[in-house]
Structure formats: structure tokens, C-alpha cells
Amino acid sequence: MKVLLTCMECLQENGSRDFRPVVVTVNDERFFKMTCPNGHQSLTIIQQPKHEVLFELGMNALVDGYPREAVTSFASCLENFYEFCISQVSLDKGVDRASLDAGWKYMAKQSERQLGAFVMLWLNYFGSAPTLLSDKSRGFRNRVVHQAYIPGLDETLAFGDDIVACVSSNLRDMKHHLGDGLDAIFTSEFIARASSQNQRVTTQSIPTTIDWAGLIQNETVNLRTRLEDIKKDKVIFQWPKF
């Protein structure tokens, strides 16, 4: 998946009149060492949490005609959202990073343990069970991942809708209990990633389908409409006319 990033030095020197974005391919770290058309070098971090990027990878896979790959990206999105919640809420409640990392080792490669940890985290801190994926969607995901089932567009979008509903519901629950603390959680996550580089970095946002700020405001997410938007954007992302 390709995204457009802005050279901040160009913007500072020339403003928007000489705006020439840099096309980069998303990586696991969401860090990008880039050189703009004017020769400025920079290290840029994408602010979006990993689960939002994973969902966007799934949407781009659908646009390219790969529904099976979209399902695996959507499923990975949800699992990473569980991990995000476990780590960030635990840190917010006073667990130190070293202890959190030590505990995570026992479940890092076992998704069922992670799901159990996520459920117990919710019960412990928020006093209720979280919203989980429906049995139908879990069965669909298992058919695709473990039984080599090749899904169609409609059922893949239905699975994506269930992922969106699950993430949205839990984010709104977090907002209800944490208030402005939720904003701080998302901010601290990307600041921690930026600080890990021990050098000057710039931070930028990219548009995502499940942007957390929109979800907590009950903004409607129409996956079919979003697919059409991505199709239009890919002309810019993959064949820029500089």
C-alpha cells in the first residue's frame, strides 16, 4: 500500500505553492526515511495506530481484487486492536513497560490467550464484557484462514463491517470510561514510537477507514463508498504526475 507524505521543510520554506508529495510504501514500523524532490531528507512517522493501517491494507487488497488477503488483513486488524488496548490501557493504569513486556511474552504468539487477556482487561477496568466478533464472522475467518476458502466481495465486506462494529463499540466504551484519557492514549502511543528513534522526526497523519476519532463520534463507515474513494486515490498514489 502506498501513501503520500509531505516534506515539512518544503512547506516551511515555500508554503503550499510548491507542494510535491513523496510516495512511500507502508512498512511495519510506519517510519519512513525519505528524500523529497527538492533534496530534503527526513524521517517521518505515521501517527495512525497499527490496527488502522492493517484495516487499510485490507481495503486496498479488496480494491486490487484480492478478497482473501483482505480478510486476513481485517482479522489481523482486530487482533492488533486487542493488543493495542491491552498494552495502552495497562500503561495508562500504571503498569510499567518492562512488566507489560514480560507478561506479553506468554501470549505474544497465541491469539486465544490474547483474546482472554482482552476480555479480562475490560471486565477489570470497565466493569463489563467487551464487544467481540460474532460467531458467524469468527467461523468465516476460520474458513478463509484455515480451510483455504476463497471469499467473494459481499461476504468479505460483511466481515469488514463486523470488524468495524466491534472496534467502534469498544472505542466508544473506552471513551465513556476514560474521557480525554483516550485521546492521551493514542497520542502517547505514537510519541513513544517517535521517541524510540533518538533523532528528530516529523509526524503526519494519513486517511484511514476506521479513524478512531471518527468512530468515537459515531461517524458512519460505508465500506463500499470507501472502496470507490480508494480506487480514485490509487491513481495518485501509484502514478503521481509530478
Image (spheres, grey):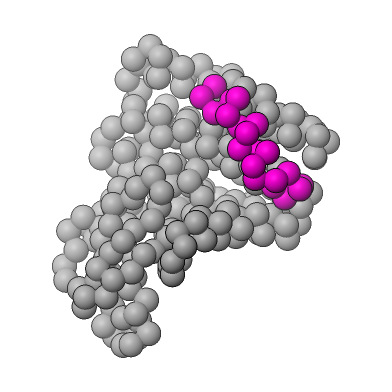
Q: Residue furthest bottom?
A: 14
In x, y percent, where is residue 211?
52, 53
* In-image side of 161 versus 186 (left or right): left
Instruction: Tally the numbered discs.
Output: 0
Return the residue nearer the eye: 54 or 91.
91
- Indicate whether 8 appears above or below 29: below
Which quarter of the rendered picture does the C terminus lie within?
A: bottom left
In x, y percent, where is residue 67?
33, 30
Q: Quadrant of residue 151?
A: top left
Is residue 26 covered in magenta?
no
* In-image side of 149 versus 161 (left or right): left
Is residue 108 covered in magenta?
yes
- Indicate whether 123 appears above or below 53: above
Residue 240 seen in this snapshot: yes
Q: Residue furthest top?
A: 147
In x, y percent, where is residue 158?
47, 31
Residue drawn at (33%, 43%), measured in percent from left and top? 60
Return the residue nearer the eye: 155 or 113.
113
Residue drawn at (44%, 42%), measured in percent from left and top? 55
* In-image side of 129 versus 155 (left or right): right
Residue 232 seen in this snapshot: no
Which range of residues does the magenta coloring cover? 91-110
In x, y percent, where is residue 87?
63, 42
Residue drawn at (74%, 29%), measured in percent from left and top? 120
- Indicate whether 89 appears above or below 6: above
Q: Quadrant of residue 16?
A: bottom left
